[in-house]
Image (cartoon, helix red, strand yellow):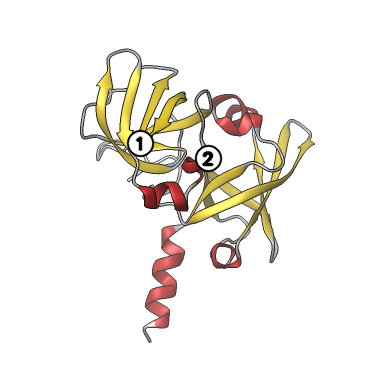
Amino acid sequence: MFTGLVQTTGTVGSIEGGRLSVRAAASLDLAEGDSVAVNGVCLTASAIRAGDGFDAEVMPETLRRTALGGLEAGDSVNLELALRADARLGGHIMQGHVDGTGTIESVREEGFSRVVRIAADPAILRYVVQKGSIAVDGISLTVSAVDDQAFEVSLIPETLQRTTLGDAASGRIVNLEVDVLAKYVEKLVGAR
């Protein structure tokens, strides 16, 4: 389980043959077999390079369903370790199971913040509500607006500085994970 509070960013060293190699910008307390979210996708660290980063295997299914398949060497990624039981829950509950991808439609400045509009499939938008939570590339964010084609999030300077969304540009594909509570409610109500 994750919270969407990105701990550091990393740089893709390579992604080939189902193996993703990441150089971390800061030291991560990561051991082989640990879960780590890479742009919101839960992966298992299969090799650790002391002071440098880690490797993880990425299944073809994951590459097809997420934006990880479009990564290239040199790309920046958001990194978060799995939540410890004694840690503070500061973002929202996330599983690292991406529901789909979206495309950044526009980015505009609004005072000290930046508003990012992301187009998404109706199958995802059905779970998105204004003032609700959503994960974009593994970042826990609050939805500031939503319609039948897209949603918006407003990014504060801290998010812009500490995550890859600081470089967000139109056309970029991002991973989306909707609030798991909405999916459970739908399942329970639908069972009646």
- The percent position of residue 143, horizontal first and vertical second, equals 62, 52
Q: On the rendered structure, is 184 left or right of 109?
A: left
- The percent position of residue 82, horizontal first and vertical second, equals 31, 38
Of mark 1 and mark 2, the one earlier in the sequence is 1
In the rendered view, would you say 129 is above or below 71?
Answer: below
Q: Residue at x 25, y 40 (%)?
A: 85
**Amino acid type of the residue that numbered disc 1 sits on in the rendered structure:** Gly
Other-residue count near label 1 (Cα within 10 Å), few / some / many at <14 / 14–19 / ≥20? few
Numbered disc 2: secondary structure: helix
**Amino acid type of the residue that numbered disc 2 sits on in the rendered structure:** Gly
Q: Residue at x 34, y 46 (%)?
A: 59
Q: Is residue 187 visible?
A: yes
Number of the front mark, 1 or 2? 1
Q: On the rendered structure, is 32 left or right of 66?
A: left
Q: On the image, numbered disc 1 is attached to which residue?
A: 17
25 and 110: which one is in front?
25
Q: Quadrant of the C terminus?
A: bottom left
Question: Alpha carbon of mark 1 to alpha carbon of mark 2: how far?
Answer: 14 Å
Other-residue count near label 2 (Cα within 10 Å), few / some / many at <14 / 14–19 / ≥20? few
In the rendered view, would you say 19 is above or below 40?
Answer: above
Q: On the image, numbered disc 2 is attached to which residue?
A: 70
Q: Quadrant of residue 190?
A: bottom left
Q: Residue furthest top?
A: 51
- The percent position of residue 174, horizontal first and vertical second, equals 56, 44
Q: Residue at x 66, y 35 (%)?
A: 168
| Mark 1 touches mark 2? (CB < 8 Å) | no
Q: Residue at x 26, y 22 (%)?
A: 48
- The percent position of residue 64, horizontal first and vertical second, equals 45, 51
Q: On the rendered structure, is 107 left or right of 83?
A: right
Numbered disc 1: secondary structure: loop
The total of numbered circles placed on residues is 2
